[in-house]
Image (tube, rainbow, N blue to C red):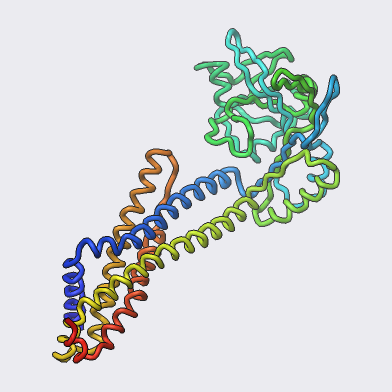
């Protein structure tokens, strides 16, 4: 049996190599189909993993509500535009939503100058509570983060982001030193480890400094002056952001729904934005399934075209080899031997096309990564699936020509010239 299969494969290869150009042109449809599938899957998987990693770094057990200016809302003259989430929203969430591990609000002041001796740095001031570090995964390099006594006493203490500490103190130890601004002096009680990703924050946490929430409300102005295109406007926010962490990720859907309903009851305008990584991850998985389905359809069409091309060439080959088929049948060859011969040739065409397509498909993501600096990931199934489909295509589209060859009457075939 094994020797028969070897003879069939050897004969198939010999037949295909007799018409090298025709065989190559025949498999181009399969090559392009497989190459497009492999490369698109690699690029799609890379983008998907990159986005998923960013969401996972933020944490699927976390949720952020950020104040946003509602559409078609402006302040004219000396009017002050008031919008966004409030301390009352935070208190209601903390009181009514179960299964919360921690919750914290922030009040932010952009571009405020601070001095440490003769060194000066323009940084963002973030007023918050001790739970902020847990929610946003901030790590302490030296000293400590803000504590409840700091909050209760509106203490003039500050925790420096890694970049802010370098700009203000260069290579000196900041811990225990004081920095000053137009709002007064602040004692450095901690320095953060450099944060690699911005995660849920719209600013670079390394360039920020963190003070107690009560301190920022008492020592800094609560009306922001915004200049855009030469026009001035004034904004007043109670909180820029509310962040929370669930005690377990499985509670996140329930928590997100409750928070969404609570905020909606107190805000007539859409002056907030909810970011729920858990929901984004689920949406990403659904989108990926749709993407794979669409890609599968495209691949199916490409391979269908390639398969039709293979079938046409095999039918032409049957016509060209009619006399050969007649001689083999007259010498005692069985129909299944003829079928095996032509199905093998068809399968060899599609398999070679699939292998070349995989080679091309693997090279394309590498080129994309090198030129566009986009992460691409080639998974085993992204290679096995297109190759398997291409082989199956060869078998399916080779059956009809093979049966047509096998059903020829030996006498009629021998008369063919």
With respect to residue 237, does 383 lie above or below?
below
* Residue 338, picture quadrant: bottom left
Along the viewing direction, whichever of 256 and 361 lies nearer the viewer: 361
Q: In screen coordinates, is 18 left or right of 56?
A: left
Q: Position of residue 175 (x, y in %)?
A: 59, 21
The mark tally for this picture is 0
Residue 222 higher or lower than 250, as above or below: above
Residue 72 at x, y percent in the picture: 79, 35
Rendered image quadrant of residue 398: bottom left
Q: At 61% across and 54% down in the image, what residue appears?
A: 283
Image quadrant where residue 18 sits: bottom left
x and y, in percent, of residue 109 in the image: 71, 24
Q: Is residue 180 left or right of residue 35?
A: right
Q: In this rendering, is residue 65 above or below 161?
A: below
Quadrant including the N terminus: bottom left
Q: In this view of the protein, which residue sits in the foreground, 145 or 312? A: 312
User: In the visual, does 318 lie left or right of 303?
Assistant: left
The C terminus, quarter of image: bottom left
**Residue toward you, 221 or 244:** 221
Q: Could you tell me which residue is drawn at 84 percent across and 24 percent down? A: 76
Residue drawn at (70%, 40%), measured in percent from left and top? 243
| Furthest-top residue in this view | 118
Residue 256 in the image: state x and y as whole percent. 72, 51
């Amino acid at each position: 049996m094994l020797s028969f299969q070897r003879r069939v494969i050897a004969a198939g290869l010999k037949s295909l190599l007799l018409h090298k150009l025709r065989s190559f042109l025949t498999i181009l449809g399969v090559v392009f189909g497989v190459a497009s599938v492999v490369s698109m899957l690699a690029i799609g998987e890379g983008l998907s993993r990159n986005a998923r990693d960013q969401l996972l770094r933020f944490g699927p057990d976390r949720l952020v509500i950020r104040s946003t200016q509602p559409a078609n809302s402006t302040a004219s003259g000396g009017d002050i535009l008031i919008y966004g989430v409030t301390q009352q929203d935070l208190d209601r969430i903390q009181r009514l939503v179960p299964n919360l591990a921690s919750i914290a609000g922030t009040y932010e002041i952009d571009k405020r100058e601070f001095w440490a001796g003769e060194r000066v740095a323009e940084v963002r001031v973030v007023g918050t509570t001790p739970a902020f570090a847990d929610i946003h995964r901030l790590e302490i390099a030296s000293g400590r983060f803000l504590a409840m006594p700091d909050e209760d006493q509106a203490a003039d203490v500050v925790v420096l982001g890694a970049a802010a500490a370098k700009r203000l103190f260069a290579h000196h130890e900041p811990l225990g030193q004081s920095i000053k601004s137009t709002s007064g002096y602040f004692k450095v009680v901690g320095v953060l480890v450099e944060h690699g990703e911005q995660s849920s924050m719209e600013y670079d946490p390394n360039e920020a400094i963190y003070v107690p929430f009560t301190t920022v409300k008492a020592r800094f102005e609560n009306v922001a002056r915004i200049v855009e295109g030469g026009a001035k406007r004034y904004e007043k926010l109670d909180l820029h952001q509310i962040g929370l962490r669930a005690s377990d990720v499985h509670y996140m859907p329930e928590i997100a729904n409750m928070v969404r309903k609570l905020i909606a009851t107190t805000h007539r305008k859409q002056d907030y934005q909810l970011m729920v990584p858990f929901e984004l991850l689920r949406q990403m998985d659904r989108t990926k399934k749709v993407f794979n389905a669409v890609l599968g359809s495209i691949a199916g069409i490409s391979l269908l075209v390639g398969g039709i091309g293979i079938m046409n060439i095999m039918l032409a080959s049957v016509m060209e080899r009619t006399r050969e088929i007649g001689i083999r049948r007259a010498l005692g060859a069985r129909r299944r031997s003829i079928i095996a011969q032509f199905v093998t040739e068809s399968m060899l065409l599609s398999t070679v096309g699939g292998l070349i397509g995989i080679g091309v498909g693997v090279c394309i993501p590498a080129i994309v990564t090198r030129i566009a600096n986009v992460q691409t990931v080639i998974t085993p199934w992204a290679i096995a699936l297109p190759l398997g489909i291409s082989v199956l295509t060869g078998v399916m589209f080779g059956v009809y020509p093979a049966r047509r060859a096998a059903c020829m009457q030996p006498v009629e075939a021998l008369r063919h010239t």
